[in-house]
Image (cartoon, helix red, strand yellow):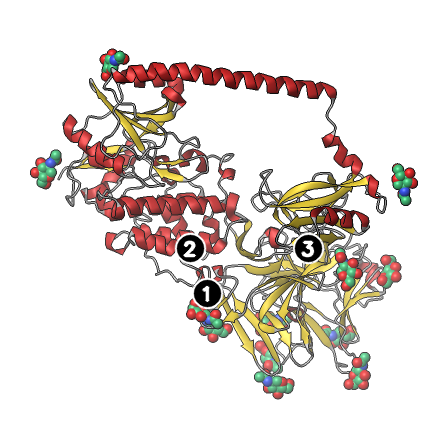
Amino acid sequence: MNTKPNSKFVFSVILLCAFLESHVSLAADTISENQSLSGDQTIVSAGGMFELGFFKPGQLSNYYIGIWYSKQVVSEMTVVWVANREIPVFDRFSSVLSILDGNLVLLNESKTPVWSTNLNSTTNSGSVQAFLLDSGNLVLKAGSSNNTSEPLWQSFDHPTHTWLPGGRFGFNRITNHPQILTSWKNLVDPAPGLYSLEPDPEDRSSYILLWNRSRKYWSSGPWNESSHIFNQIPEMRTVSIYNYTYVTNENESYFTYSPPNNPKIVSQFLLSASGKIQQRTWLENSKQWNLFWSQPRQCDVYASCGAFSSCKPTSLNYCKCLKGFVPNLQSDWDSQIYSGGCSRRTSVKCGNATQDGFLKVNMELMPENRQYEGALSIESCRSACLNECQCTAYAYSSSDGCSMWHGDVLNLQVLEANDGGEILYIRAAASDIKKKRVIKPSLLIAIVVTIIGLIVVIFGYFLWKKTLGNKREHKKNHNESKSKFDGGGGKDDAELPIFSLRAIIAATNNFAEGNKLGEGGFGLVYKGILAENQEVAIKRLSKKSGQGHQEFMNELKLIAKLQHTNLVRLLGCCLEDAEMILIYEYMPNRSLDKLLFDASEKIELNWGRRFRIIEGIAQGVLYIHKYSRLKIIHRDLKASNILLDGALNPKILDFGMARIFEINQTEANTNRVVGTYGYMSSEYARYGHFSEKLDVFSFGVLLLEIVSGKKNASFYRFEHSPTLAGWAWELWKEGRGMEVIDESVREACRLDEALRCIHIGFLCVQETPADRPTMSSVIHMLQGNESTSLPPSKEPAFSTHRNSNPVCSSKTTTGLSHNAVTMSLPEGR
Ligand SMILES: *[C@@H]1O[C@H](CO)[C@@H](O)[C@H](O)[C@H]1NC(C)=O
Ligand SMILES: *[C@@H]1O[C@H](CO)[C@@H](O)[C@H](O)[C@H]1NC(C)=O
Ligand SMILES: *[C@@H]1O[C@H](CO)[C@@H](O)[C@H](O)[C@H]1NC(C)=O
Ligand SMILES: *[C@@H]1O[C@H](CO)[C@@H](O)[C@H](O)[C@H]1NC(C)=O
Ligand SMILES: *[C@@H]1O[C@H](CO)[C@@H](O)[C@H](O)[C@H]1NC(C)=O
Ligand SMILES: *[C@@H]1O[C@H](CO)[C@@H](O)[C@H](O)[C@H]1NC(C)=O
Ligand SMILES: *[C@@H]1O[C@H](CO)[C@@H](O)[C@H](O)[C@H]1NC(C)=O
Ligand SMILES: *[C@@H]1O[C@H](CO)[C@@H](O)[C@H](O)[C@H]1NC(C)=O
Ligand SMILES: *[C@@H]1O[C@H](CO)[C@@H](O)[C@H](O)[C@H]1NC(C)=O
Ligand SMILES: *[C@@H]1O[C@H](CO)[C@@H](O)[C@H](O)[C@H]1NC(C)=O
Ligand SMILES: *[C@@H]1O[C@H](CO)[C@@H](O)[C@H](O)[C@H]1NC(C)=O
Ligand SMILES: *[C@@H]1O[C@H](CO)[C@@H](O)[C@H](O)[C@H]1NC(C)=O
């Protein structure tokens, strides 16, 4: 496997230096008494999987002996084991890895041993050899054959930061020693960092993550033998392509795992320099490591951001210094690894109370190591902290009284908003605080002027409003055009307000282009401002309803009665001349597709928000299916029909439209198909059959879009997987479910929740309507706790047989846009 010239070298340690100039590597997988390793030489395992030699992780010429995947297997240099983690050598040509007195030893430039297998040389006097096996295990064996009994020493017993498949990771009951994975110090320094993973001394069937070998910050929870997962890693259930096994006997207890049946899958379990455990697989196609699952979340890693630094779970750059603090020099913000935290801009004058003060910060999560000081008043709490040199912060609440922090404050999260949350007072130099308080005289004048101006404006407004109100009152008496807008809603049970066309024209500035909000399924949508400054969305229907005006009005009145927080409210209508116009409540955050599919805007949609949106849509659909007075099948559920209000709550638009345009709602089939390709189930697209299960299908597609941040319509370009569901399914089958999740939320999402959503998505898009769940069971599944196991899903519809659907495939070739346009397909039946 090695591309370098093959040549056998016979030399002793003493002779070694003479040969150093020749760049030759060893052909074997063995280091023996006659065959040492130095310079650029490497040994490669018999099957060509792993390579061992000197490597240099960073810019410095610090060299380490390590094992890595050979280039043919994993093209990105990935070290899985390091011998001399703490003591690098600087000149690899005059350093040597060799067998000395029955041990494998690394000698540095001055021939001093810097690393050794440390076996008792009197017990293994015979000749020994080291073999690099295809599993990545380096074994030291007596004799010259690698198939003799037990190894004297093996690297699998001394893992560094990576646990490879086939390795045992656990506790030796005879020596009473646990195995420990220790993170690298940072990305370029393999020295043991602050994070370590080891079996829990209290329960050997679970693992704990420690900071500085002492502070526990995460536990895997006990192993559950029946479901083969750790309690705190529920996502193992859904991505369990690895076969983890727990073995315990009188000598030892350990876990081992094998990669999936497919031996080609290269996989590893590691403790990253940022304090998280990660299971990842190598993707040969994209030449990168794919994170399978990872625990815990970055902000839950102890001291993840260092001192006086706030962690923001939803941001890519997690760490941010508190107000008045600046990053320490050694902080490495970019690589997101353990940072040295932040320091005060100006140091505090400890012990000189008049010189210091406190900065007030609203906290989402209070820092670690809080000490309760009892029921002091807030003033005495403040002065107690001020008078104590070590006190760095205090907080006060009426329920808990006074609490203080001493030394560095760690693991905190600052609230984004400027109010709410708990308030933390952080000690700071008076000079850092005063800056904010001093108001320049000119500024003061400006403020006074502004306030006076405001008072005048407000007074003027009320005066104007009063005269306007009188006028309107007068108008109302003479006009039958009902303007029942009082903002409250709900009063008008009996009727739907009807607007005059003139009012609509005035509100939209004669349907001005600038007021256009978008193009919905049944016509253009405009923003309108009615009298009393109420903002509304105005939909100008472009189609003719098959019904007469009276029937149309009756339908609209029924629809207007459907009121649910997750449905856009119909506020009124206008039927004049040839116009059919609907007036809806206005949503400032536009439609879901505008946010979800925009690289810069989707950041707004963190996982928590996405999950709430999914739940809200499900509730809205359930309502129209089941609890409303009318049974409505939406038939055109899609991202652009979901509007978001100011708090990003989803509201479904255009429900009932299909009902207006197709009177035959209760029939099992229709002669006209309304809907959007990609969101339509096959029975509907082909035969016009529809039931609630059509909406369930569309909901499934929408759900997958929300989780993946990918447009279903964008998949038509790819031959190999014509739908989003098909693409996701392929990944899912290979246990790469995590890749389905939108990259912008993958790191910070609740993995079990996201994977559950994907699973539910698959259940919803199954080919046979009867297999799809109802909306009420979808909601049940969404809310289900971790222990609810979902039924297995069948392959999604449309995922592979692109041409099995004549309607859709013919439409695909006509070049219709598949997402923006709602199609009405005449179906010859
Ligand atoms: C190492 O070399 C010595 C003599 O040079 C030889 O006797 C011995 O068999 C060799 N050992 C191996 C394992 O090749
Ligand atoms: C070799 O290692 C020893 C012990 O760590 C150290 O004292 C010595 O300076 C090292 N030699 C070189 C050339 O670095
Ligand atoms: C090595 O083994 C011998 C024999 O078992 C024992 O006497 C000696 O104390 C051991 N040395 C060390 C350093 O453990
Ligand atoms: C070690 O053993 C494996 C399988 O048992 C074999 O494929 C490999 O060639 C052996 N290597 C050496 C150096 O004997
Ligand atoms: C090691 O393997 C070789 C060939 O595979 C075989 O001839 C030899 O007997 C084996 N040795 C032992 C101790 O099993
Ligand atoms: C880690 O703990 C040791 C004592 O066990 C202490 O001396 C050291 O300062 C700690 N490291 C950090 C970074 O706090
Ligand atoms: C193990 O998992 C099964 C199925 O998920 C569950 O019923 C059982 O309660 C779990 N056992 C423990 C000890 O958590
Ligand atoms: C998992 O591994 C164990 C032993 O390593 C084996 O007995 C068991 O059959 C394997 N299970 C699966 C599903 O591969
Ligand atoms: C435990 O170790 C002893 C002594 O090495 C050995 O005889 C015994 O078989 C071991 N038990 C297991 C279950 O491996
Ligand atoms: C405290 O601050 C005052 C004013 O700056 C200064 O005169 C005094 O020496 C300081 N006392 C101590 C103990 O630092
Ligand atoms: C009342 O509305 C109608 C149209 O619905 C319009 O023709 C009429 O001029 C309006 N009356 C007044 C006083 O504005
Ligand atoms: C509704 O369906 C019935 C029976 O299928 C049919 O007779 C009727 O004409 C349909 N009405 C409309 C408006 O399509």
Left or right: 68 with respect to 711?
A: right
Q: CA distance from mark 3 to mark 2?
A: 46 Å
**Residue 720 makes an appearance in the image:** no
Q: Position of residue 144 (x, y in %)?
A: 68, 76
Q: Quadrant of residue 467?
A: top left
Q: Residue at x 26, y 17 (%)?
A: 477
Q: Position of residue 553 (x, y in %)?
A: 19, 29
Left or right: 121 with respect to 29?
A: right
Question: Which of the two discs, 1 and 3, labels the residue nearer the N terminus?
Answer: 1
Seen in the picture, residue 495 relative to 453 is either above or below; the reply is below
- Label total for image: 3
Left or right: 517 with respect to 330?
A: left
As helix, strand or loop, the secondary structure at mark 1 comes to: loop
Quadrant where ligand 5 appears: bottom right
Seen in the picture, residue 703 relative to 505 is either above or below; the reply is below
Q: Camera-side residue: 221 or 566?
A: 566
As helix, strand or loop, the secondary structure at mark 2 comes to: helix
Q: Position of residue 819 (x, y in %)?
A: 34, 34
Left or right: 87 with respect to 711?
A: right
Query: Could you tell me the amino acid type at mark 1?
Result: Asn
Question: Which of the two discs, 3 and 2, labels the residue nearer the N terminus?
Answer: 3
Query: Could you tell me the amino acid type at mark 2?
Result: Arg
Ligand 8 contact, mark 1 (Cβ < 8 Å): yes
Q: CA distance from mark 1 to mark 3?
A: 62 Å
The residue that label 1 is drawn on is 261
Q: CA distance from mark 2 to mark 1?
A: 24 Å
The residue that label 2 is drawn on is 756
The residue that label 3 is drawn on is 375
